[in-house]
């Protein structure tokens, strides 16, 4: 074979692999998995900074795989709706088949379960239950209105609970951060459904936006953000923290960032402002993870 032809084939193969990996990273929403892993590790460090490195690594693998797989199976079940709401995603755009997405979810869910085994029975059971709920959310629970949003918020909040189990510390110490994350996630999920309203309506999916209107959805989101803002001084008064100023500063940055993105999207609902909302939401989560470190109980 001509050396130049060989180099061309190698370059072409490399580009194909890079393109495929990029497609799978979009299916998995890779940044979400990374943030989930960081949140779990931050919880462990907050409660038990002396935890062995293996626990951090296993927790990161469990959460990254679990939440990435959840995105994949969500796209698998939502393919018809995504043809309307998110036509550029890997499945509706034709870059991945339904079978590929299904196996992508199964493999990562399996990895999450296997990695959870060394973390103990309670951690394994928590992961197993979360996987069952995540698998069934898109084609069963999503049709139950705001209950589906609540289920997602509970599952996301469980990542802090998992960190508490791994750290082998009383989970009550993380009760407030768990509730904080629950309210934050619920507000975000209600707004996500605003963008998906048309596709949800055609597929018969019941959401707050479709049932009570987008105005009510935004009011619920702002109400939850208001609850979170009001909870910060209450937490400072009632909860012992090693670094209260650290927690306050980054929690305020988290809510300010989300509030600005939400305001922009509410003022002009478009694909660009929605994508901006999702982009800045990830920064908000990062601020929240850093703020979580400040909630460590005093030694």
Image (cartoon, rainbow, N blue to C red):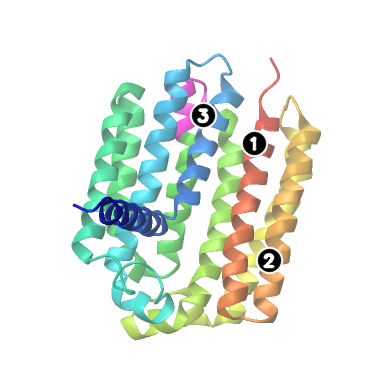
Who is closer to the viewer here, 149 or 234?
Answer: 149
From the image, give the main secondary structure of the stretch colored magenta.
helix
Relative placement, left or right, of 229 versus 9 is right
Residue numbers of the magenta segment = 162-170
Question: Residue 25 — which label?
Answer: none
Residue 171: mark in rendering: 3
**163 part of magenta stretch:** yes
Q: Residue 263: tell me if it is visible.
A: yes
Camera sees residue 140 = no
Residue 278 part of the magenta segment? no
Real-space Cα separation, disc 2 to disc 1, in angstroms: 22 Å
At mark 1, the secondary structure is helix
Q: In this picture, is 118 found above or below 15?
A: above
Q: Is residue 220 left or right of residue 138?
A: right
Residue annotated with mark 1? 292
Q: Position of residue 220 (x, y in %)?
A: 61, 68
Q: Earlier in the sequence, mark 3 or mark 2?
A: 3
Number of numbered discs on residues: 3
Residue neighbourhood size for the residue with mark 3, other residues' Cα within 10 Å, grouped as few (<14), some (14–19), many (≥20): some
Name the residue at 71% across, 63% down.
259
Query: Pointer 3 and pointer 2: residues touching (CB < 8 Å)?
Result: no
**Which quarter of the picture shows residue 264?**
bottom right
Q: Is residue 196 left or right of residue 273?
A: left
Mark identifier at residue 261 = 2
Viewport quadrant of the C terminus: top right
Which of the 4 quarters of the picture holds residue 29?
A: bottom left
> First in sequence: mark 2 or mark 1?
2
The image position of residue 283, as x and y in percent, is: 64, 52
Mark-to-mark CA distance, 3 and 2: 32 Å
| Residue drawn at point x = 74 percent, y = 43 percent | 250
Location of residue 148 in the rendering, given as x and y in whole percent from the top left corner: 40, 63
């Amino acid at each position: 074979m001509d050396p130049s032809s060989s180099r061309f084939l190698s370059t072409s193969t490399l580009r194909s692999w890079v393109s495929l990996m990029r497609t799978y990273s979009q299916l998995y929403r890779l940044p979400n998995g990374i943030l989930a892993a960081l949140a779990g590790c931050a919880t462990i460090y907050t409660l038990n900074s002396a935890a062995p490195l293996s626990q951090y690594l296993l927790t990161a693998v469990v959460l990254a795989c679990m939440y990435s797989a959840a995105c994949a199976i969500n796209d698998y079940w939502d393919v018809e709706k995504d043809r309307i709401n998110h036509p550029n995603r890997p499945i509706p755009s034709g870059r991945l088949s339904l079978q590929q997405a299904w196996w992508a979810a199964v493999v990562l869910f399996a990895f999450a379960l296997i990695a959870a085994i060394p973390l103990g029975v309670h951690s394994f059971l928590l992961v197993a239950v979360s996987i069952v709920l995540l698998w069934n959310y898109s084609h069963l629970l999503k049709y139950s209105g705001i209950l589906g949003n609540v289920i997602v918020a509970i599952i996301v909040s469980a990542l802090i609970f998992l960190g508490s189990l791994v750290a082998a510390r009383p989970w009550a110490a993380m009760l407030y951060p768990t509730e904080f994350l629950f309210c934050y996630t619920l507000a975000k999920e209600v707004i996500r459904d605003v963008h998906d309203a048309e596709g949800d309506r055609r597929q018969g999916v019941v959401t707050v936006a479709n049932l009570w209107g987008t105005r009510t959805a935004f009011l619920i989101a702002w109400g939850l953000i208001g609850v979170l803002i009001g909870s910060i001084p209450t937490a400072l008064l009632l909860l012992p923290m090693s670094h209260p100023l650290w927690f306050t500063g980054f929690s305020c940055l988290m809510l300010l960032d989300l509030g600005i993105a939400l305001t922009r999207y509410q003022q002009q609902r478009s694909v660009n402002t929605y994508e901006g909302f999702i982009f800045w939401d990830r920064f908000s989560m990062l601020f929240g993870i850093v703020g979580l470190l400040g909630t460590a109980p005093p030694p």
